[in-house]
Image (tube, grey):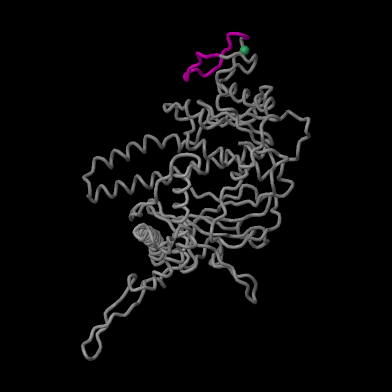
Amino acid sequence: MSVGAGSVPVVSRHTTFQFTADPSAEQARGLARHEGAARFAFNQGLRLHLNARRAAKNAVDDPAVPVPWSGFDLINAFNAWKKTEDAGRRFVVDAHGTAEVDVTGLAWRSEVSAQVFEEAVVDLGKALKAWTDSRRGKRAGRAVGHPRFKKKNHERGSFRLRNKTSRTKAGVRATIRVGQNGPRSVTLPGIGAIKVHDDTRRLRRMLAQGRARILFATVTRRGGRWRISLNVEAADLHPAARHPARGDGDHTGWVGVDRGLHAPVVAALADGTQTLRIDAAPRALRAAQPATRRLQKAVSRKVKGSTNRRAAVKRLARHHERVRARRHHFLHQVSNLLVKTHDRLVIEDLNITGMLTNHHLAAAISDAAWGQLARQITYKMAWRGGQLLTADRWFPSSKTCSGCGQPKDDLTLADRTYQCPACGLVIDRDLNAAVNLATWGEQHHLSQVLDPEARGQVTNAHRREGSGRRTRVDETSPDDVGTLTHAA
Ligand SMILES: [Zn+2]
């Protein structure tokens, strides 16, 4: 995985704005109804799909039995089904006492936006494709299982709505709007203007200037809280926010980023200059683990099915949600710092760093968080036209002397400083590793084959089926950089 300055295509920037919702009681019921409808559509789509597969299997000599696999075919199958007697009917008794069946179709289908059904069924299509690709070996990574029926979960759920725009006399009208009912509000079709905790000013400004378009909204419920995440296509960064290109003969400026054991992140140049050091994860994250254990114990002590247990489960879910939000905020801060001030970065391969994890050190970043940070650095670096390399997974960045290059195999996790027996260098352990990564970048950047597949990681939101036609938007201003609104 590497992204070179010369090879970076002009990417459209996808980013998300997250808001914590504060819905009225009626709106909360509407949100819950939409969430239930999404789950229902997913399950019904899966039922229709499996029934069709069974029918096709039983009718070997009749190849005409169609099985809906794609999101498109699944939407059609679902839409056809929802008007049928199977979806809903009622008995009507006339004046003579004769009962007749009145086919109503899915009776509550008008109470929720039809898009919720479609988006859920599109997700099913993607899940089916991931499963078939995985079985045929066309998909890298862990094996993907067959999609399963979704159960109602009291702690979490979600649904998605597309933004639909139409031209009116007054201008372009969108179904998803921000700031319509006060600066802290987000309007969703079928639900109305929902109050949010965070200001929408930055997004409103970008929308008003035509530098951003809302593509869709994902509404999630976690631990009793509703969150609205708006997926936005934003214009490319202003040239002033992009790193200038380096000449072909320039091998300098590489900065190694080490996921330290004592400091969560240490960045340094090959000459030993430390350019960034995050000394500790925020207190909230360090303190999270004991609290998690305490709350988990509280759950296990309660009798299954009891009200007390349900309350304890809820407290645990709230806690997880808070930690998640803080980690999210922290990682974005770190990745922003790294990509703003450096145009050439070298990070470690995830697989090798995972082997070094020391679970006793609260300062260390977890594997999952490091993976998230690496993804953020990848796409943010591409936005800024910088370069990013991933060091060879077998490169011993920790166990090599950054002064003389001699290996040291007896370095333990407890060693805070690196002491070289060959040249006598004494250096902070994490800084030593970062310097080694920078040196690796200087030596290897020319031989790294720029992988066109790496572009896939440039965007953090993928184009999806059913998300409509896109047009390009104009450039953003420098202060739109890092367009993330954090909900703490
Ligand atoms: Zn040495």
* Majority SS type along the magenta span: loop
Q: Is residue 421 magenta?
A: yes
The location of residue 232, given as percent across then percent down, is 59, 56
Res. 41 image quadrant = bottom left
Taking depth in this image into account, of 32 and 64 the one nearest to the observer is 64
Q: Quadrant of the N terminus?
A: top right
The location of residue 320, given as percent across then percent down, is 40, 44
Decide: is 276 above or below 78: above
Q: Quadrant of ligand 1?
A: top right
Decide: is 425 above or below 250: above
Res. 303 image quadrant = top left
Q: Is residue 201 left or right of residue 324?
A: right
Q: Is residue 395 magenta?
A: no
Q: How many marks?
A: 0
Res. 406 image quadrant = top right
Q: Can residue 286 be seen here?
A: yes
Taking depth in this image into account, of 429 and 37 the one nearest to the observer is 37
Q: Residue visible at 33% across and 74% down? A: 85
Q: Which residues are magenta?
A: 408-423
The location of residue 414, given as percent across then percent down, is 47, 19
Q: Residue visible at 57% across and 30% down? A: 348
Q: Residue visible at 71% across and 30% down? A: 446
Taking depth in this image into account, of 21 and 439 the one nearest to the observer is 439
Decide: is 427 above or below 85: above
Decide: is 447 above or below 222: above
Q: Is residue 334 left or right of residue 65?
A: right
